[in-house]
Image (cartoon, rainbow, N blue to C red):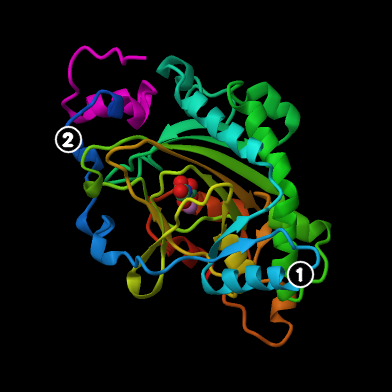
Amino acid sequence: MAPTIAAPITNSSEITDFIISKGNGVKGLSEMGLKSLPKEYIQPLEERMSMSQIMPQESIPIIDMSSWEDDPNVAESICNAAVKWGFFQITNHGVPIEVLESVKEATHRFFGLPAEEKRKFLKENSPSNNVRFGTSFTPEAEKALEWKDYLSLFYVSEDEASALWPPVCRDQVLEYMKSSEAVIKRLLEALMKRLNVKEIDEMKESVLMGSKRINLNYYPTCPNPELTVGVGRHSDVSTLTILLQDDIGGLYVKGDNDRWIHVPPVSGSLVINVGDALQIMSNGRYKSIEHRVVANGSKNRISVPIFVNPRPCDMIGPFPEVLEGGEEAAYKQVLYSDYVKHFFSKAHDGKNTVEFAKI
Ligand code: OGA
Ligand code: NI
C-alpha cells in the first residue's frame, strides 16, 4: 500500500511524530523512498561498522542436533561453543520447517498492517504492557536511533496471548514457541550438566526458563546503511536466545581483537546465544557475547528471537554447584527484574549491563 504522506518530513519533531507517535516506524520512513538518512539515525563513528573490523575467514560453530540422543559429542559441542563463542547455530533441531516459515510470514503480515492497526500496540495505546509495538530500542534514552521496528510479546499464558496478541501473527508465534520448547530444554540440560547441575528441578527451571519474550524484528531497507545500525552493540539479558533469521544476513558477533564475525543465514537453522543471566549463573563459564545488526541498503530483513529468561521475580546469581570447588563468585545475587530495568534504562552500550551484577 502506498504511504499517504503529503509533504517530505524535514524536522526532528515531525520525524518523531511520524515514526513513533503515528506508528509508521522506520518502515514507513523507508517506504517514502527518502534519499538520505535523517540525522537522528546517524551513529557516532565508533558505533558504525567498517569492513576492516570484519573477520571474513571466521565463523561460529554449526551443530547438527539430529543424533542428540545417542551421540554425546552433540552435548559436548554445545557446551564448548557456549564457553568459547557464546554463539552457535543448530540444524535438525526438531522445530518443523513449516513452523519457521509460518512465523516469518506472520512477521511480514504484522508489519504489513497499516500504521493505524500497528499503532494500537504502541506503549500508550496497548491494552497490556506485555504487547508492545515500537521502533529503535529506547528512543527516550538514545542519542542516535536504531534503524529497526519491532513487536515485543511477553508470554504469560495461552489465554492472555489469545486475548491480547495481534491476531495476524498470534497463532504462528505461539506455535513457534511451543515447538521450540523441547530443543530449549535439551540445550539447557546439556549446559547444566557441564556445570555440575545434575537435575533441572522446579526452582532451576524457573530461574533458567521461567519466562519468555518473543520479538518480531523488522529492519527495512535503509538509505546510507553505513551511517547507522540495525541494532547497536549489546549482549542479551536472557538465559538463552533462540533466533530465527531470514536469508538476508547482517548479524555480527564479536570475536577476538574487537573484530566481528558474520552469522550467515543457514536455511532451516536457529541461532543460539548465551545471555547475561546464564553468564551470571555459570559464574562466567558461559559467555554472553556482544552482537549487532548492520542496516541493509537494498533489502528488508526480519528476525524472530525468543528470549528464554528467568522470571522477573527470581533472584539470579552464580549457582552453588558452580562454586562447589571453592571458586569465588564473580557476581552477586540480583533481582532479575532490576537487571532488566537497568538494561532498558540506557541505550545499547556493548557489555556494560553485566557490570550491574559484578562483585
Ligand atoms: C536482539 C538481536 C539480532 C537479529 O533482538 O537482541 O540481537 O539478528 N537481534 O535481529
Ligand atoms: Ni541480541
Residue 333: image quadrant is bottom right
Q: Are marks 2 and 1 in contact (CB under 8 Å)?
A: no
Which dot marks residue 354?
Answer: none
User: What residue appears at the point 46 percent right and 26 percent down from the top-left corner?
Assistant: 111
Which callout, 2 or 1, points at the residue further toward the start of the chain? 2
The secondary element bearing badge 2 is classed as loop
| Residue 77 falls inside the magenta stretch | no
* Residue 23 drawn at (x, y percent): 39, 23
**Magenta segment range?**
1-28
Count of numbered labels shown in the rendering = 2
* Residue 285 drawn at (x, y percent): 60, 75
Task: Name the amino acid, label 2.
Answer: Ser
Q: Is residue 205 above or below residue 246?
A: below
User: What residue appears at the point 61 percent right and 57 percent down from the top-left corner?
Assistant: 90
Q: Quadrant location of the N terminus?
A: top left
Which dot marks residue 36?
Answer: 2
Residue 244: image quadrant is top right
The secondary element bearing badge 1 is classed as loop
Q: Which is more toward the observer, 355 or 299?
A: 299
| Residue 19 falls inside the magenta stretch | yes
Q: Which is more toward the observer, 122 or 152?
A: 152
Q: Quadrant location of the C terminus?
A: bottom right
* Residue 141 drawn at (x, y percent): 35, 45
Q: Is residue 81 visible?
A: yes
Q: Quick check: 26 left or right of 236?
A: left
Task: Name the amino acid, label 1.
Answer: Asp
Q: Quick check: 175 left or right of 55?
A: right
In the picture of the structure, the residue carrying the numbered disc 1 is: 71
10 Å crowding of disc 1: few (<14), some (14-19), many (20+): few
Residue farthest toward the bottom in the current orientation of the protein: 326
User: What residue appears at the point 62 percent right and 55 percent down from the top-left corner?
Assistant: 91
